[in-house]
Image: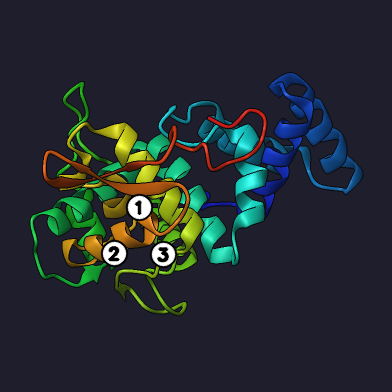
Amino acid sequence: MCGLLLERAEELAQLYAERGNWTDVKDTWFDERLSNRSTRGSSQKIYRVLTSRFKNAPTTLPNPSALPEVFEECKTTREKAQVLYFYLVTNDSLVQYVVHEYASRLDEGKQEPLDFSDEALIAILSQLTYSDGDSFDYADSTTKRWCEGFRSVMREIGVLDGQQSVVGSSPSVGDIPLLVAMDYSHESDEEWITAPRGLLYLFQPENRWEELFDRAAGTDAWEYLELHGDLDLRPSEEPYSWIRTEGAV
């Protein structure tokens, strides 16, 4: 796993916002990489990984052309990482499988440490069965590198603290990643409020949801409405309408 590749992802999203099509983006990307003495092999790998995440992003996430505007509103590098993290989870089946396992534990109210040690991750991966009946079967060295890559992502989004730590905690969530998580949750499931997928992906336990809902409702993007005597939380306009840029979802 290549990680979030934050700086390169920002560059690629900016190119896509400017060029508007992936053919021109590809030509410009390789011209710039080679002029900066990057090897074509490394440039191809990064381009392939990132374009897969962006091209295959579900419509429940912001259009990649809107990401420069989203990043502009982020206050920290960690907030940008928390936004990009959704594109990784929705594109990488192994990452998604593992994140789903931790999210399910949170949704069930289990009070367990967020253990991302090799042993804990391998125990989850060993339960994976593919649609053709095959099970997870990476070489030990490849599995170890994958676990290290997964932990590096957890550090970038604030779940793990420090290079050596393997047990983490629920991270603080910035305003912009919160809005992405809320809109993603709303668009992913009709009954989203009982198990908001975006918040669970960011390892937010149920006892934090009310606070996060209130924070979202405190912005112009979300609001509480009284409906049949109950308060209903919903986007003020269309999801992602808070991204004021052409091409936004």
Q: Which residue is pictured at 37% across the width and 62% down the height?
A: 215
Q: Quadrant of residue 128?
A: top left
Disc 2 to disc 1: CB gap under 8 Å: yes
**Dot 1 or dot 3, earlier in sequence:** 1
Residue 41, horizontal then vertical, whole percent: 71, 38
Q: Which residue is pictured at 59% across the width and 59% down the height?
A: 74
Q: Nearer the viewer, mark 1 or mark 3?
A: 3
Q: Is residue 70 left or right of residue 18?
A: left
Could you tell me how far apart the alpha carbons at marks 1 and 3 are, in whole angstroms? 29 Å
Foreground: 225 or 234?
225
Q: Please name the residue that numbered disc 3 is placed on.
A: 173
Q: Which residue is pictured at 44% across the width and 35% down the height?
A: 237
Residue 144, horizontal then vertical, whole percent: 37, 58
Q: Which residue is pictured at 33% across the width and 33% down the height?
A: 187
**Residue type, numbered disc 2:** Asp
Foreground: 175 or 68?
175
Q: Secondary structure at mark 3?
A: loop
Q: Please name the residue that numbered disc 1 is placed on.
A: 143
Q: Please name the residue that numbered disc 2 is placed on.
A: 118
Q: Secondary structure at mark 1?
A: helix
**Residue type, numbered disc 1:** Thr
Residue 210, horizontal then vertical, whole percent: 23, 62
**Residue type, numbered disc 3:** Val
Residue 143, horizontal then vertical, whole percent: 35, 52
Could you tell me how far apart the alpha carbons at marks 2 and 1 are, in whole angstroms? 9 Å
Residue 78 in the image: above or below residue 224: below
Q: Is residue 180 left or right of residue 128?
A: right
Q: How is the image coloured?
A: rainbow
Q: Quadrant of residue 227?
A: top left
Label 3 packing within 10 angstroms: few (<14), some (14-19), many (20+): many
Residue 230 in the image: above or below residue 218: above
